[in-house]
Amino acid sequence: MPKKSAKSLRSYRWYGPDDLRSFGHRSRAASMGCVHADYEGKPVIAIINTWSDINPCHSHLRERAEDVKRGVLQAGGFPLEMPAITLGETFQKPTTMMYRNLLAMETEELLRSYPADGCVLLGGCDKTTPALLMGAISMNLPAVFVPAGPMLRGNWRGQVLGSGADVIKYWTERRAGGIDRQAWLEIEQGIARSAGTCMTMGTASTMASVTEVLGFTLPGASTVPAVDANHRKMANLSGRRIVEMVWEDLKPRDILTERSFANAMTAVLALSGSTNAIIHLLALAGRAGIKITLEEFDSLSRKTPVLANLRPSGDYLMEDFYYAGGLPAFLKALSPYLDLSCRTISGKTLGENIERAEIYNAQVIRTPENPVFSSGGLVILRGNLAPQGAVIKAAAASPGLLKHTGRAIVFDTYNELNARIDDPALAVTADSVLVLRNAGPKGAPGMPEWGNLPIPQKLLKAGVRDMVRISDARMSGTNYGTCVLHVSPESFVGGPLALLQEGDVIELDVERRKLNMLVGDAELSRRRTIWQPKKAIYPRGYGKLFIEHITQADQGCDFDFLEGTESIPEPEIH
Ligand code: FES
């Protein structure tokens, strides 16, 4: 039985009454060719579309919006496409993370200020997914997510190429003198062959999977390749489903619980997903009024096996994952670690959604009896260098470096890193620990993906391919290496990273979850008394707002004034 009647639809306040304002709304709808029958008594569905000419990952979303509209119309709704800011990972500077919260605000306010009864969210490139979800959770109108889907596998001279991971791999080889310019140009032309998101288990694929596990997509939607005909069908079915959801009054906070977030964390770990997902999940939970912590991540990490054999930690790509059964088959294998009773937007439970899923390639999707790693995709570290925590993707690190002691080479800024890293005079050895600071949420600002610090060229030429690297930055989920990230609190606000000096000994012990600088307390106190904060670089504008309100990485990097579930009144219509 529908819970909603036509007159209780939110949009009725705009289109229904016999008054001056509604006359204006109806007459202007008429100017766009609409008749009363288009919208009268029908759910208005906002299609929030992050398509743009500058965003290759979303270049098919203009067409997909038409598929969604078709579904909305078929189900008796009224679709309205609403463009929103695009966060194109490869082009937007200094980093899309700077604008995640802006898109979240835009999504929430578009939904609030216009006559939306429900929404379909179109996006997929890294920060877009959490941003759209954060806005939709805060607005709490029925919402379906249509993930952009991964692009096709890359190809170079018959070899499969994966986004990000192979860029770093071949760039490292080029700097070491192992491949020439011709080969490099061929790789450039072969690594991104279609619309869609990065096809490794980077941030985009991790967050699409999180979205499905949290219950925001139709079953299996997160793994359908962007250019597969099934992607168009999924968009169509999503349009149909959102109309039903409006009548059912099924809203985001009806499906989000502590248990669904525990499922999402478990899935990230078993996918050996992106470290960025930790920050985004903290922010998403904050919007739903649910508290999750780094400790929960870490305790789940100790017992969750890695079951997805996907790059950068494993061997395969998202296209292979899809053919192997996709996320539903993966979740079925992971079932013993999940709460299958969680609700989803399909109207069914997670368990019902995956009931009929099967694994078609046991190399790509493993089982707990035959995992890729028995535990520990992502690990949370603490110590006097990171009292509020730091993160390492242990599954993508060199096993021999997971317990390591070495002297720090410290770079104060990203520019200094680039200027000094290949200096032949740099006193660096393979045992050194490369440290970058002032790269955090406020310091950079925006916490860019600088955490995969380059290996000095002279070491590359000597055959070194990995070193311990530490920063308060993030790292692309498509990258690999022994990189300690998200050090909190960041150096810009006076976190202990700010007190580190070149030559200090750093001790990393992933097994024991430790990250320490071997410097005495008295010496650290002395250094603190002479530490001077750096000046923020934005005197005005969005950057100023960002720095004043962004929270630290261990809290999700949301704006402090956007967290929580306090209700905001509906806009007056007069
Ligand atoms: Fe958009 Fe990787 S650049 S998902």
Image (cartoon, rainbow, N blue to C red):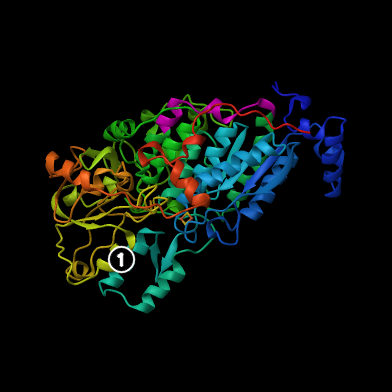
The answer to whether residue 471 of the structure is visible from this angle is: yes
Question: Residue 433 lies in what quarter of the image?
Answer: bottom left
Quadrant of the rendered image containing residue 39:
top right
Please report the bounds of the magenta region as a residue range: 247-263
Residue 144: where, in percent of width, then height?
Answer: 60, 38
In the rendered image, residue 149, in percent from the top left (x then y), is placed at 52, 50
Q: Is residue 218 left or right of residue 442?
A: right
In the picture, which quadrant includes the C terminus? Answer: top right
**For residue 504, above or below residue 112:** below
The correct choice, above or below, for 423 with respect to 113 in the image is below
Please tell me in which quadrant of the rendered image residue 302 appears: top left
- Magenta span: predominant SS is helix
* Residue placed under numbered mark 1 in the picture: 418
Residue 379 picture location, percent across and down: 28, 40
| 507 relative position to 274: left or right | left
Secondary structure, mark 1, is helix
Q: Quadrant of the N terminus?
A: top right
Q: Is residue 418 magenta?
A: no
